[in-house]
Amino acid sequence: MIYLKPIAALPLIALVAACANSGANYTPVIDGPVSANYNADLASCQSLAASQPAFDGSSAGAAAAGAGLGAASSVIWNDNSDNLGEAAAIGAVAGLTSNAIKKNQNKESIVKNCMRNRGYNVVG
């Protein structure tokens, strides 16, 4: 398990990146003309998406599942429990990262749907 420590930083970096570039800041691609209220509508939709929590009960479940999977895989692959805590921590961070990415995608969907409901032809 010599390579475990450098690899351990990857999920943490991904988690920070997922939180820093929030889906609430998403600007959808609009096909066709936009109204004079476009900027106000976009800001309102982005505000709605930003009001959604970044972490909730599902985040704790994702962290727990990741920790369990990390610990179990460490025991199976290494045939011992020497790095059990480290593997569980890496798994927990990976679980949180996956949950943060999912929340980010949900916020983008909120922005897209909100803009559609305001009459814009959102294509992406």
Image: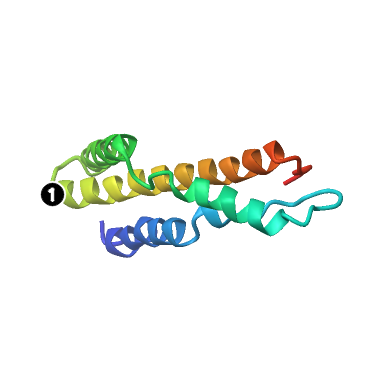
Residue under the image location 77 percent in, 57 percent down: 36
> Which residue position holds label 1?
82
Residue 11: where, in percent of width, then height?
37, 55
For the point 16% across and 46% down, the residue is 84
At x 39%, y 61%, the residue is: 16
Residue 47 shown left or right of residue 38 in the figure: left
Place residue 110 in its image quadrant.
Answer: top right
Q: How many marks?
A: 1
| Residue lying farthest to the bottom in this orientation | 6
Closest to the observer: 96 or 43?
43
Q: Is residue 3 left or right of residue 89?
A: right
Residue 42: percent from left, percent from top: 64, 53
Residue 15 image-quadrant placement: bottom left
Coloration of the structure image = rainbow
Q: Residues within 10 Å of mark 1 (few under 14, many from 20)?
A: few
The answer to whether residue 25 is left or right of residue 11 is right
Image quarter (top left, top right, bottom left or bottom right) of the N terminus: bottom left
Specify the quadrant of the image occupied by residue 12: bottom left
Relative to the observer, which residue lies in front, 51 or 37? 37
Specify the amino acid type for callout 1: Asp
Q: Residue 61: image x %, image y %?
A: 28, 34
* Residue 26 higher or lower than 73, as above or below: below
Give x and y (percent) for residue 122: 75, 44
Q: Residue furthest front?
A: 36
Looking at the image, the residue that sits furthest to the right is 32
Q: Is residue 77 left or right of residue 39?
A: left
Looking at the rendered structure, the secondary structure element under dot 1 is loop
Picture residue at 72% right of the left edge, 54% below the top = 37
